[in-house]
Image (spheres, grey):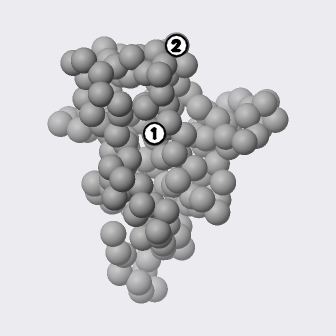
Amino acid sequence: MEAALNHQTAPDELAFCEHVAGAEFQAGVDAGRWRLLEVTWPTATLAISAAARPNSPREFFFCFELSGYPAGATARPIDIATGQTLPAEMRPKGEIVGHAFRTDWLEALYVPWDRVAIEGHPEWRIRHARKLWDEDLGILSYLRPTHELLNSEDYRGV
């Protein structure tokens, strides 16, 4: 994805464009771990692949809110056909995975690399310091651990 590099493109959007054009992001695309579907700044829709499980999709879709990027991001799982938040019965299951994709909390993932989740849980900054958003990694800070969850032994499908 390339943004028109002109004076009207905001710095946060330029930073995102640089990250998704980078080698590490593209290596994930080439490996089939994730893909960028659409950007309408400040939102972006990305797909993250999941391990094969019976009667379950091979990827999940996320609507990212990227205002202020690369300072952080928040994402909600969506039904790509409707653009609506993914209903509970279509969310990934598992002890750890199910907790991350819980529906009894806000629409964001309940994980320490999510901007909304970390704002509500400042104690996670110490407890989960290695899993926090890293401005230098940008979107990879979200994609890598979410991909790991969806491809872990704990992931049981939907």
Image quarter of the C terminus: top left
- Dividing the picture into quadrants, the one containing residue 61 is top left
Circle 2: element type: helix
* Residue 85: mark in rendering: none
Between residues 104 and 22, which one lies in front from this camera angle? 22
Residue at x 25% of width, y 29% of height: 57
- The spot of residue 157 in percent (x, y) is 34, 19
Image quarter of the N terminus: bottom left
Residue at x 48% of width, y 46% of height: 143
Residue under label 1: 147
Task: Work out whether 44 lies above or below 117.
Answer: below
Residue at x 67% of width, y 31% of height: 120
**Horizontal arrangement in the rendering, residue 49 relative to residue 80 (left or right):** right
The mark total stands at 2
Q: Residues within 10 Å of mark 2 (few under 14, many from 20)?
A: few
Residue under label 2: 95
Can you see residue 68? no
**Horizontal arrangement in the rendering, residue 73 relative to residue 88 (left or right):** right
- The spot of residue 72 in percent (x, y) is 60, 52
The amino acid beneath tag 1 is His
